[in-house]
Image (cartoon, rainbow, N blue to C red):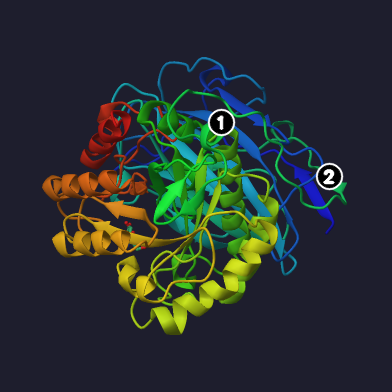
Amino acid sequence: MKISKRIMAVLISGAMLLSSACTDNGAQVPMASDVQQTTSVEATESSTSSSVATSDTSAVESTSTTAVTSASSVADTTVSQSTSTTSSEPQDVPDGQTLSVTCTIPNSWQEGGMECTQIDVVVRNISDSDIEGWTIDMTLGQEHEVMQYWNTEVKPNGTVLSCTNVGYNALIPTNGEITYGVIVKSASPINDITCSAGGSKLPTTQENTKPVQTATSTAAPSAPQIAPPEKTGRYGLVSECGQLSVKGADLVDKNGDPVQLRGISTHGIQWFPAFANKSVFKHLRDEWNVNVIRLAMYTGAGEGYTDSTKAGIEKTVQDAVDACIELDLYVIIDWHVLQDQSPQVRKADSLRFFEYMSKKYADHPNVIYEICNEPNGYASWEGDVKPYAEEVIPVIRANDPDSIVIVGTPTWSQDIDKALASPLGFDNVMYALHYYAATHTDWLRDRLKTCYSNGLPVFVSEFGNCDASGNGQNNWDQAKKWFELMDSLNISYVNWSLADKAEAASLLKPGASTTGGWSDNELTENGKFMKSWLRDHQ
Ligand code: IDC
């Protein structure tokens, strides 16, 4: 596959509407020195780009940051407009500025002759007071169609895409930040993005925009360039435990000794890609003591995984896998079947995806494949899940013969007894049990005990301390009973979820930093509990 690599500058400059009451009628053009903007552009892959896209996909990474001026967070008029200069180093933020906006293009690809561009945006409150309500008008320079968006409401208007807060991220505390993202389709590549407040479009001058350059490569997709793992001396990392396998009902390390993986699952990686990065994972490894990250990729069309979005989403997964490998972490690639009920619905995509991933990561003991999150509804073990697994596992095994594969079970991965009655005939397979402590209690723990004592290898690849909706109240009594049981059986477990969505299951409060290093103020009740539980775990 011929892969083209575009190096592209994204320019973002402009003003911010500070509150819903704000207008920008009084916009003024500040002195150039009032506004600081940094645009840095880097090509992160030298000659090759890999993707699981069905269409030709090129990875483009560009970052642009600007500080945006305003009178103050309580003002009812906006102030700001900016000209900007390109430089590679951030400068001091001048007085009077309120928000900084960082715009990244982690993925772009072609599809049906159109250009698809994912734009991730981080908005940071750099003022000394909280901000309630924000709107960013992004001028993309051309007509476009919005394919997907998260953590924002969008209002397309010609070449302008207006992005407004949703309820849970309206508030940006001082020094806090929120993230949102969009994927747009356009006739030609997006070369620069200009932001403005309330429609006061800011000029993008030619000198603000780096020329688009093109580089091509005919090299085939190859394994990522992996630096030697960073050592921490913590428990259960890949450099210590190596290739895992299954012995009886137990997960064991390269020496055959039982090992327990404990970690965190992302929320849908298509909705919260901002938290799936190396800096966050490193913080979780070093400060929370996790040794596994699960990457949940929802696979239903209504969940945003469509023919036009899947290339971008899958690339986000790959980047996150690469980050985990660099960090010496185990990583679970989760084909997050939920809305579709049966994994048969998307089997063709699954076979393509796991064929690609298992080939790409064949030499990395870090990678664990979870082939169907939670079959549910009509999906039965014998009629749907088992035959699906019998097709997918050989595809993985052909590339990566000794990897661990986790197989979901019916009724949202509660029916491990069905797997016990009719297990799969492959080595190194584990069966998923999922629980939410405020919903699933003794009866499901009893099922786990029975299945384990009958030799079934079980992996709790997702659990919550709240109820099964992902919300409601956390139930710490039940949570502790689950931990006691799982620890006594050395069963691995992964908490849902690494997101700042306003729901009980989230580990992070809305607007939490996307680079980790969270203070307790940025953690939810679940976040604080899980941090101390995992960190102090022996
Ligand atoms: C939930 C999310 C919620 C989202 C919903 C539908 O927490 O924000 O709106 O999915 O996409 C599961 C699923 C997991 C669910 C979670 C909580 O694997 O996707 O996430 N849950 O409902 N099984 C049991 C509970």
For the residue carrying disc 2, how many other residues have a C-alpha within 10 Å: few (<14), some (14-19), or many (20+)? few
Which comes sooner in the sequence, label 2 or label 1?
Answer: 1
Residue in front for this viewpoint, 95 or 434: 434
Left or right: residue 535 compared with residue 157: left
| 270 to 345, vertically: above or below | above
Q: Residue at x 55, y 74 (%)?
A: 390
Residue in front for this viewpoint, 430 or 309: 430
Residue in front for this viewpoint, 533 or 299: 533
Position of the C terminus, as image quadrant, is top left
Residue 114, position as x, y percentages in the image: 71, 64
Residue 9 seen from this side: yes
Q: Amino acid at mark 2?
A: Thr
Using the numbered discs, state the Cα–Cα distance from disc 2 to disc 1 in whole angstroms.
23 Å
Q: Amino acid at mark 1?
A: Thr
Q: Which mark is residue 19?
A: none
Q: Quadrant of residue 197?
A: top left
Residue 487, position as x, y percentages in the image: 28, 43
Residue in front for this viewpoint, 479 or 103: 479
Reading the image, the residue beneath label 1 is 65
Left or right: residue 177 compared with residue 74: right
Residue 469 seen from this side: no
Eye-nearest disc, 2 or 1: 2
Q: Mark 1: which secondary structure?
A: strand
Reading the image, the residue beneath label 2 is 214
Q: Mark 2: which secondary structure?
A: strand
Position of the N terminus, as image quadrant, is bottom right
Q: Residue at x 56, y 39 (%)?
A: 242
| 502 to 171, vertically: above or below | below
Q: Are marks 2 and 1 in contact (CB under 8 Å)?
A: no
